[in-house]
Image: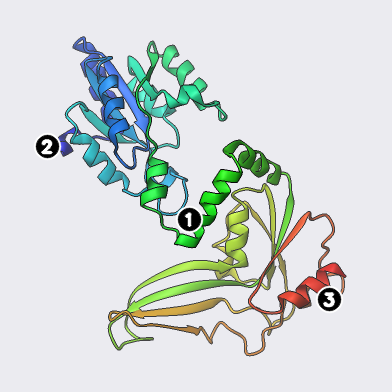
Amino acid sequence: MSNNKIFPIKKLGEIAEELRNEGKSIAYCHGEFDLLHFGHMRHYKQAKSQADILMVTLTPDKFINKGPGRPVYNENFRAEYIAELECVDYVGVNEWTTAENALKTIKPNVYCKGNEYLKKEDVTGRITIEKNLVESLGGRMFFTDDVVFSSSKLSKNHFSVFPKEAMSFLHEFGKEYDNSLVIEKLKELKKLKVLVLGDSYLKETIATHKGDAFECPLEKSHQAIGAIETANQLAQFVEDVTCLNINNNVEIDDYFDNRVKLITINIGDETGLPLKKLNYITSDGQNSQRNDTELTPEKPLSIIDAFKGDSFNLQGFDIVFIDTYNNSEEINEVIHE
């Protein structure tokens, strides 16, 4: 029955138009709605009280950026359990990062948000933009007023993917520093010019049959690790990130975030860094690792060789990150020279 309520956004727009032609009014809610809780239930009921029909859309998985383990439930599960609610008439998974395009498509009479949005500063200006848009479409904004719960707090406290030590640190950190201070410091990071030095690898995990390690792969997956991973993470916070890359390792280059500036230094035809580390997992759970000998030179030169002569200049960078499996102290000495 619930699947009869779930439609693409375009179809929801067509349904909304038909309903308006029948003289019915439409209330609309949008959000992540990851861990459905009592606050969501009250929010939907109050929203439904404002109109004849209630439509709810969800932020898709790919646009939820609240850390590891989020969303707890994927977009299909979230849509299905919301559609089971009696007060909700139609459900859709949004196709964009914000609700603006969905608002233009559905054109609700009432756009409903929780009262927590009234209590906190509209840092991104998103609520103001959506309010102006709704009003330009002939609708109005309505803030439900009830008890506020937080899916993020529920997830952090009861569904955490972090070990106990990390949770303890985050708890103490949260008590000492408030959100506004952390956000302010993160904004300051944006202005820095950062360089990442180190070894970049692709970790290839291969699932095999029991006893068939290194043969008959069933499934493969790749993960960029080392300096490439560090550079990609930094690019989430800093606008100017450069990563020093030794030789033309095209296979690795494809895994860099497009915001990372790559500087490639060729230090010899027979030198370079190992491209790939292989991780074999057999069906009985056994795990073994090895380097891909075809891609790993017998005597790879250290990244230190890149600093010989005038091949690279460190001046102009505010911070240098070293991410390497070997020679980190030696690299540090070269940098300070």
Total number of numbered discs in the rendering = 3
Q: Residue at x 38, y 76 (%)?
A: 206
Q: Quadrant of the N terminus?
A: top left
Residue 249 in percent (x, y) is at 61, 71
Q: Say the numbered circle drawn on residue 1.
A: 2
> Of marks 1 and 3, which one's residue comes earlier in the chain?
1
**Does residue 250 lie above or below 24 as drawn?**
below
Of 270 and 51, nearer the camera is 51
Foreground mark, 3 or 2, reads: 2
Q: CA distance from mark 1 to mark 3?
A: 44 Å
Q: Residues within 10 Å of mark 3 (few under 14, many from 20)?
A: few
SS class, disc 1: helix
Q: Residue at x 21, y 9 (%)?
A: 23
**Does residue 335 lie above or below 96 as drawn?**
below
According to the picture, the residue beneath numbered tag 3 turns out to be: 308
Q: Is residue 160 left or right of residue 330?
A: left
Residue 187 in percent (x, y) is at 66, 40
Q: CA distance from mark 3 to mark 2?
A: 69 Å
Foreground mark, 1 or 2, reads: 1
SS class, disc 3: loop
Q: Say the numbered circle drawn on residue 167.
A: 1
Of 29 and 154, nearer the camera is 154
> What amino acid is at disc 1?
Met
Of 321 and 277, nearer the camera is 321
